[in-house]
Image (cartoon, rainbow, N blue to C red):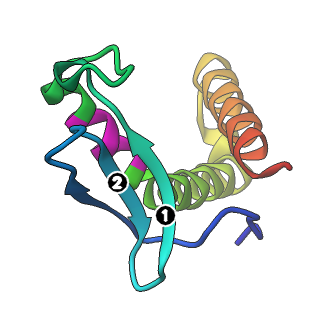
C-alpha cells in the first residue's frame, strides 16, 4: 500500500450549521476538521444548492476510501496483465495498460505534497 500524507480516513460528514448552512467534514475518531462545504441558500458565499453541497460533502468524505479502492483495483488489474496479458487481444491489453497508467497517475496526484 502506498503511504499517503493526508489525514487518514475514514472521514465523515458532520453537522450542518443552522446559522450558515455549512457542512463539516471530519476525520472519524479524530478531532480533525478536513473541510467545510458552503451552500448558497444561507448567503455566506456558497454557490451551490443545499442538495449539491450535501452531495459534495459526501463525495469528499468518501475520498480516503475511494483512494484505497482505486489503489487496490489498480494493482489487481496490473497483476492480471502481468500474469494473463498474453491471453488478451492486443487491443484489450493496450486498453487495460492505459487504464492502469491513468489510475496510477491519479493516485500519484492525490498523494504528492
Q: Name which quarter of the figure residue 43 lies in.
A: top left
Q: Give the percent coordinates (x, y) of residue 94.
A: 69, 23
The span shown in magenta is: 54-60
Q: Give the percent coordinates (x, y) of residue 40.
A: 25, 18
| Residue 24 marker | 2
What residue is rendered at 48% in x and 83% in y? 30
Q: CA distance from mark 1 to mark 2?
A: 7 Å
What residue is rendered at 62% in x and 16% in y? 91
Direction from residue 55 to residue 77 in the image, left or right:
right
Q: Nearer the viewer, residue 57 or 40?
A: 40
Determine whether the residue tagged by mark 1 lies in a helix, strand or loop: strand
Going from N to C along the chain, the mark reached first, 1 or 2, is 2
Q: Quadrant of the N terminus?
A: bottom right
| Residue 33 marker | 1
Direction from residue 12 to residue 107 in the image, left or right:
right
What residue is rendered at 14% in x and 47% in y? 18
Local crowd size for mark 2, using a 10 Å CA cut-off: few (<14), some (14–19), many (≥20): many
Q: Nearer the viewer, residue 88 or 100?
A: 100
Local crowd size for mark 1, using a 10 Å CA cut-off: few (<14), some (14–19), many (≥20): some
Q: Give the percent coordinates (x, y) of residue 17.
A: 21, 50
Q: Is residue 97 above or below residue 57?
A: above
Proximity of marks 1 and 2: CB atoms separated by less than 8 Å: yes
Q: Nearer the viewer, residue 6 or 101?
A: 6
Residue 58 lies in the magenta stretch: yes
Q: Give the percent coordinates (x, y) of residue 83.
A: 69, 57
Q: Is residue 36 above or below residue 4?
A: above
Q: Residue furthest front?
A: 19
What residue is rendered at 26% in x and 31% in y? 53
Q: Name which quarter of the figure residue 108 lies in.
A: top right
| Residue 11 marker | none
Amino acid at each position: 500500500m502506498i503511504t499517503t500524507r493526508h489525514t487518514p480516513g475514514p472521514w465523515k460528514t458532520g453537522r450542518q450549521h443552522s446559522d450558515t448552512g455549512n457542512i463539516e467534514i471530519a476525520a472519524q475518531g479524530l478531532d480533525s476538521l478536513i473541510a467545510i462545504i458552503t451552500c448558497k441558500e444561507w448567503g455566506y458565499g456558497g454557490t451551490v444548492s443545499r442538495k449539491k453541497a450535501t452531495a459534495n460533502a459526501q463525495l469528499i468524505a468518501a475520498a480516503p476510501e475511494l483512494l484505497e479502492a482505486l489503489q487496490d483495483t489498480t494493482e489487481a488489474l496490473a497483476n492480471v496483465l502481468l500474469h494473463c496479458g498474453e491471453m488478451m487481444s492486443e487491443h484489450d491489453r493496450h486498453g487495460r495498460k492505459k487504464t492502469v497508467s491513468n489510475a496510477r497517475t491519479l493516485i500519484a496526484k492525490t498523494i504528492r505534497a
